[in-house]
Image (spheres, helix red, strand yellow):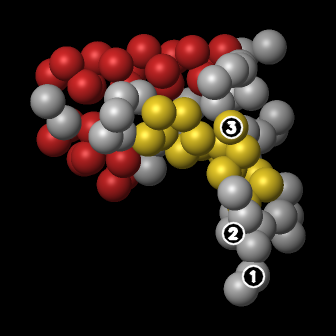
Amino acid sequence: MAYTVKLAAKAERQLGDLPAHIRKRVARWIGLLAEDPYRSPSRQLEGYPQLRRVHASKDYVIVVTAYLTDKPKAGEELWPKA
């Protein structure tokens, strides 16, 4: 099952500001995570069960949320309340 990847506007700007070799690596990981966001070596982000992370390089981490639908269900929160 393939997932749809949607980048936030801020993420798009940040991606454009990255060096070309890092941008290629991040784009590769985004493609792989679109196929399966739960693939190894992605891990659950501690304290946020709906978020997953994967290291694109030593200095760059990609954080994703996977939904089976196009958008979160009504009442579903992205961030847990503090």
Q: What is the distance, in whole Å, between disc 3 and disc 2 at their CAs?
A: 17 Å
Q: N-terminal of the two: label 3 or label 2? A: 3
Local SS, label 1: loop
Left-right relation of 14 to 46: left
Q: Which residue is drawn at 44% across and 41% down?
A: 61
Residue under label 1, please give it: 81
- Residue 73 quadrant: bottom right
Q: What element carries label 2?
A: loop
The residue where tag 3 is placed is 43
Reading the image, the residue beneath label 2 is: 79
Name the quadrant containing residue 10: bottom left
Image spot of residue 81 (x, y percent): 75, 82
Within-10-Å neighbours for mark 1: few <14, some 14–19, many 20+: few
Q: Is residue 43 visible?
A: yes
Callout 3 environment at 10 Å: few (<14), some (14 to 19), or many (20+)? some
Which residue does the image show at 66% across and 51% down from the upper left? 45
Q: Do the residues labelled 1 and 2 touch (CB within 8 Å)?
A: yes
Disc 3, SS: strand
Compute the Cα span from label 1 to label 2. 6 Å
